[in-house]
Image: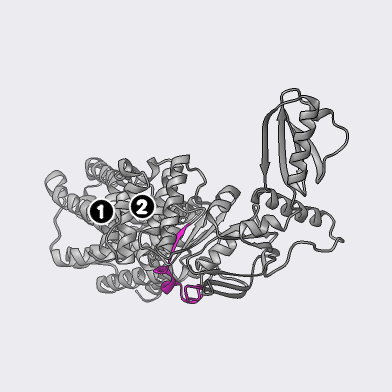
Amino acid sequence: MNDPIIQVSNFSKHYGDFVAVDNVSFAVQRGEIFGLLGPNGAGKTSTLECLEGLRQPDAGTLRVAGVDPTREARKLRGKIGVQLQTSGLPETISAADAMKFFCAYQGIAPRYDLIERLGLGEKRNAAYADLSTGQKRRLALALAVAHEPEVLFLDEPTAGLDVASRVELHDLMRELQGRGATILLATHDMAEAEEMAGRVAILLQGKIAATGSPLEITATGDGLTKVSVHTERNSLEQVNGSFPGVQQRALKDEYVVYFSSDVGPTVSAVISYLEAQGDSLIDLRVERPSLEDRFLEITNAGQARRLRPDRPEQTASNGGQK
Amino acid sequence: MTAFANHTFVELRSNLRNRQLLFLTYAFPLAFYAMMGLVMTQINPMFTESMIPAMVIFAVMVGTLMGLPDPLVTARDAGIFRSFKIGGVPAANILGVPTLTTFVHVIVVTLIILATATPLFGAPAPANWGWFVVITLATILAHAGLGVLIGVVSTSSRTTLLWTQLIFLPSILLGGLMFPFSMLPAGAQTFARLFPATYAMDAYTGLAYGAETVFSPLASLALLVIGGVLALVLALLLFNWDRNNRTARLNPAFGLVAVLPYVVGVILL
């Protein structure tokens, strides 16, 4: 994994006075699924669109599959597949005609099998305007992968998809990865990023706040494990003292939730306490912090910094923080 | 099948599903033609002499000036050109294919007018069919060029309508379609020569019908071809893939250069 297929170095993008992306650097290895995460306006789409050759960067260098997207846009087309966040097709074109149309420009035979595979078989002759949002996104994906690109850019690919289509999309992504494709995935969906991406970068206010595998990113947080306990007589709700390792305690629905830095002693102390009280356990869940928890932690810290500009930077580090 | 041929085929098939486009390209000009044949030939018998070229020019203007620009603006605003760009569709094809399919539609309407104007309304057929074909193609080229250029430089459908009417209405009123150009006052004649329809009418009159013309019909034909090619080149130079990403190489005002051949016509002819 030391062969970067996407190389972003000191990349910046401005729109007038607004800085969308500020001196960002990262690399994506060949065959990797890389997640680009961030709240709205963090710079994800600007980054993707510059890498796709749709926009010009204001500073820095970009390389995608050995090609400079700003100067060799035509060469880039055959190497990448793109599912845009906002795009469209002529309203009257059918799914089958659209496949034939784009495959002709890629110089390949139409991949009607992808239309079937992505659940559009019954709609292959329907006009684009008559497709639902999810069907349009699936068609866009089928068109993006038809020529088996080296690099696939997916911008919010599961937005508007039902559960079955989402599973099918994830299967397709894994299959493409298995055949050597690299996937750059921009998403709001933390569960999707955690499930699919080998590594992620969290963009915040145009800067990279964190990079690494989802496990690495969650490990850099406060490290507290969530222990949720539901008992028959709710005896834990009356406990004034704390258990070993517990840093915070909260009540949620019928659960008492402990945030623990040392989960083993916490769980055994809780169980001992319940036995002593004659209470019985209905449910006990131990959950490590999710990527979403860590993402919220990072974005909330970013918001706090923005509100208190005199406070020094804590998490953002251009070029990434492992 | 090449990508361009496939693109043209897909565009034609999509056109046949587009009721608005079919109305604008076929129903509207043919209904106007029928109305003019029934009414205008009774009010002004002289109109019968120029009915075929006048109605062909009308159909060309409706198909090109009204039919071409708005779909381009709508497609750009809907992100269709972004999809085309990432799909490897060249800008020349994005502009060239609708131009070509418009040629096809307008030629079909022209054939219907040619086939019916003589038996239904007694309009004289062209004396020289070869010139008629050449002038018709040049007239479509000139107007399609302007239609594409309007679509490229317009920021909205409303702007498209404004630019279209700025050419369409004076062309109808002053271009010699409704009454002879020679009947216009001198000032109006000068103004009328800023529009390709005037030169198209002149070329049809002189070359396809062998009648006397106000200015050189060959020069008129040349201006139509030069004007059409210039407008298409300008459209290509000014083309933008994305309404939010204006990276055109030239200022849209540069599109006004498309009027230059007709200004030369005012000065020289």
Give above or below for A241 relative to B172.
Answer: above
Is A68 colored magenta in this rendering?
A: yes
Q: Earlier in the sequence, mark 2 or mark 1?
A: 2
Nearest the viewer among A159 and B188 is A159
Q: Dot 2 lies on which element?
A: loop
| Residue found at x 67% / y 58% | A217
Nearest the viewer among A40 and B46 is A40
Q: Which residue is mark 2?
A: B67
Give above or below for A167 relative to B254.
Answer: above
| Residue found at x 79% / y 62% | A314
The answer to whether one can see residue B41 in this image is yes
Residue B57 picture quarter? bottom left
Gap in Å between the C-alphas at discs 2 and 1?
10 Å
Task: Please state the horizontal and vertical placement of residue B26, each as a whole percent of the image.
Answer: 27, 47
Image mark 1: chain: B
Q: Is residue B124 left or right of residue A85?
A: left
Question: Looking at the rendered structure, which numbered label has been put on residue B216?
Answer: none
Nearest the viewer among B185 and B32 is B32
Estimate how packed mark 1 is, as few (under 14), some (14 to 19) or many (20 or more) residues with alpha carbons within 10 Å: many
Task: Please state the horizontal and vertical placement of residue A170, each as a whole percent of the image.
Answer: 46, 50
The answer to whether mark 2 and mark 1 are in CB contact below 8 A is yes
Question: At label 2, which amino acid type do we have?
Answer: Gly
Which residues, given as a range, are shown in magenta?
A64-83
Is A314 colored magenta in this rendering?
A: no
Q: Dot 1 lies on which element?
A: helix
Q: Which residue is mark 1?
A: B105
Q: Is residue B65 left or right of residue A265?
A: left
2 and 1 marks on the same chain: yes
